[in-house]
Image (tube, helix red, strand yellow):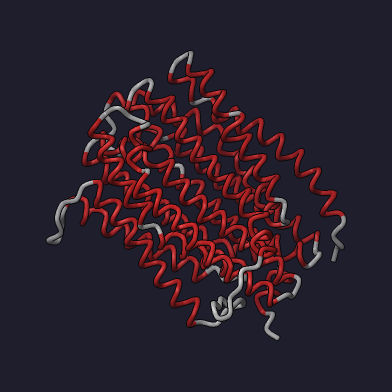
Amino acid sequence: MEQIQENKMGTQPILPLILKMSIPAMFSMLVQSLYNVVDSYFVAKISEQALTAVSLANPAQTLMISFAVGTGVGVNSLVSRRLGQHNQKEADAAATHGVILAVLTWLVFLLFGLFASGPFISSTTTNPEIAKLGTQYLTIVLAASVGCFVEIAFEKTLQATGNMIWPMVFQLTGAVINIIFDPILIFGLLGFPAMGVIGAAVATVFGQIMSMILSIVVMFVGEHKVTVSLRGFRFSGRIVRDIYAVGLPSILMQSISSILNGVMNQILISFNETAVAVYGIYFKVQSFIYMPVFGLTHGVMPIMGYNFGAAKRKRLLSALFWGSVIATLIMVVGVVIFAGFPQVVLGIFNASDHMMEMGVPAFRTIAICFIPSAFGIMFSTLFQAIGKGSSSLIISVLRQLVLIIPAALILSQFGLMYVWFAFPIAEGISLIFSILLYLRAKHTLIDVVTH
């Protein structure tokens, strides 16, 4: 009976294990964030209107990714727990259900992209050029998002087994292809027609589809700790329920980010379109900081889930500790970049003097929230790993809905520069609630036998 990967997550020293499992995911997520920034970098060279259009499309695009990643998180949590319990049949069934659910969810976004993209963008701007560009971009990235859904399903499944290399390769494949084809399709290089914003969207989905093809080949040709098999497949309501017990809160948690971006765009556009562009640049560049932390959670969560399933409380809490330390160090780098060099960051996107005037204080203010958010992310990872997805949802609702939106609305009455303080206010208060929920969750962990 093969248990090599299982033993690794249950027996190796925690810090080296976290680094071994997280660094590939952190690296691939860093490249992932790079192509998000490259997208905006080239679009900004078209015009500030084009950058604003892509920024306005971001909430719906984030919603789509939320469903893909959230379902994957639910599969990851269930597979890792079942492997920790040495229940191979249930782990295989969870992985297979994850792929089917991914395809079904894509069909919903196919319809959204074809029929709702125009009304969505038009509800956020009265500028006809921005509305046109935003609709073109959003239609493509949603309707052709099958690559995103399927690749993420396989990525999360393999991560749950302790295999972090192939998921890294999948993400790198999509990111590199996107980065290469962005300038080619946007500006019409190497004999291709100049497609502008449409080219940015096509490059994005092309990268996702190529990544999906690679993930399918690897999953069905190679040997892995779980097997995805459609032969004789029958839906299990219990397995779907177990997946979404963690996955649905994760979807809602990330979807709230979409709501936040949409509301923030509405608040900021009431001042001017440049404010929306500043927020769009911040949202893309901050992924350089947050994506590695999320990559870290990809390595930490299966370790937590496995050791929870294997009743090894001490190892689970050790993973939380070291994960928090590493996440904090990453966020310190973020504070240095955003608070120390905002002019450099904005200059990359051809920022005008007006944009500089708005963006420099905005970046420095928002940077205050980075370090508290490191702890919030790791607590959320723990909650998801032990099957308490609702606790993660509570924290996200506080951070990105209950606290930040009212704070932004109130502070907007005093001027644009005050709006940015809503971010550190929300993070600080939500961190307090995270600690309280963690202390309550420890009663669950106390019941786990310490090995």
In the rendered image, residue 222, in percent from the top left (x then y), is placed at: 50, 82
Q: In the rendered image, which quarter contains the N terminus?
A: bottom right
Q: Residue at x 37, y 43 (%)?
A: 116
Q: Position of residue 359 (x, y in %)?
A: 38, 28
Q: Look at the image and tell me whether residue 348 can be seen.
A: no
Report the front residue among 124 and 19: 124
Left or right side of 202 for 84: right
Task: Give how far across and how far down residue 180 sits, in percent.
Answer: 28, 59
- Residue reaching furthest left? 191
Q: Residue furthest bottom?
A: 1
Above or below for 274 versus 386: above
Q: Tell me: residue 397, above or below residue 143.
A: above
- The vertical placement of 194 against 96, above or below, is above
x and y, in percent, of residue 4 in the image: 67, 79
Residue drawn at x 25%, y 38% as measured from the top left: 132
Taking the spot 36% from the left edge, 67% from the top edge, the residue there is 210
How many numbered discs, if any? 0
Q: Which quadrant of the figure contains the C terminus?
A: bottom right
Say if 344 sits above or below 403 in the image: below
Considering depth in this image, is 335 or 276 the residue closer to the camera? Answer: 276
Would residue 368 be seen by someone viewing this image from the given angle?
A: yes
Name the residue located 60 percent from the left edge and 40 percent from the top edge.
Answer: 373
**Quarter-of-image position of residue 308:** bottom right
